[in-house]
Structures are given as C-alpha cells and as structure tokens.
Amino acid sequence: MTADLTDDSMDAQTIWLYDTTLRDGAQREGLSLSLEDKLRIARQLDRLGIPFIEGGWPGANPKDVQFFGSCKKSR
C-alpha cells in the first residue's frame, strides 16, 4: 500500500492522498472498529488507489497489532 515516489513518469500535477481513516477516524467517540472492519476499509481504500493508508500505531493496542500482522500476510 505504498507508491514509488521516484517514478520519473510523474508530472507536477500528481496529487498524493494520505488517508488517516483507520487512525484518526477510528478515534471518534462511540466508534469501535473490529479487526475485520479495519481490514475491509483498508482493502477498499487500496482498491480506490489511495497510495498511503495510516492504519494506526503498531503495538499501541492488540487490535492494531493484529491489523498490521494481517496486512503483512495479505501482501
């Protein structure tokens, strides 16, 4: 889920998006995303072509540890 920023074919009009839904968005009061919710959102963002997805903080809590472990396995 990363992009090669050294690609010489890119022009100056390229816009890069950095999505924080799974970190900042998950901190909304009353919202609790399951591991499957986070994986589903990450897959959809990837399908949409979002090159950078912030999934949380590895080691911050058991769910984030599972999320990053699952992402690593699916690559």
Image: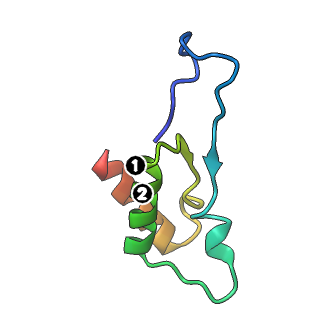
Tell me which amino acid carries mark 1.
Arg
Direction from residue 24 to residue 53 in the image, left or right: left
Local secondary structure at mark 1: helix
Quarter of the picture holding the N terminus = top left
For image coordinates 45% across by 64% down, the residue present is 41
Disc number placed over residue 65 in the picture, else none: none
User: Which residue appears farthest toward the bottom when viewing the image?
Assistant: 30
Residue bearing the label numbered 2: 44
Residue bearing the label numbered 1: 47
- Cα gap from disc 1 to disc 2, whole angstroms: 5 Å
Pinpoint residue 53: horizontal percent, then vertical percent: 55, 50
Pinpoint residue 27: horizontal percent, then vertical percent: 67, 75
Please say which color scheme the image uses: rainbow
Residue closer to the observer: 9 or 30:
9
1 and 2 marks in contact (CB < 8 Å): yes
Name which quarter of the figure residue 20 lies in: bottom right
For image coordinates 58% across by 53% down, the residue present is 54
Name which quarter of the figure residue 17 lies in: top right
* Image height of 1 relative to 14, above or below: below
Local secondary structure at mark 2: helix
Q: Label 1: few (<14), some or many (≥20) within 10 Å?
A: few
* Image height of 8 relative to 28, above or below: above
For image coordinates 54% across by 72% down, the residue present is 61
- Report the label total: 2
User: Which residue appears farthest toward the front when viewing the image?
Assistant: 13
Tell me which amino acid carries mark 2.
Gln
Pinpoint residue 14: horizontal percent, then vertical percent: 64, 27
Pinpoint residue 56: horizontal percent, then vertical percent: 58, 61
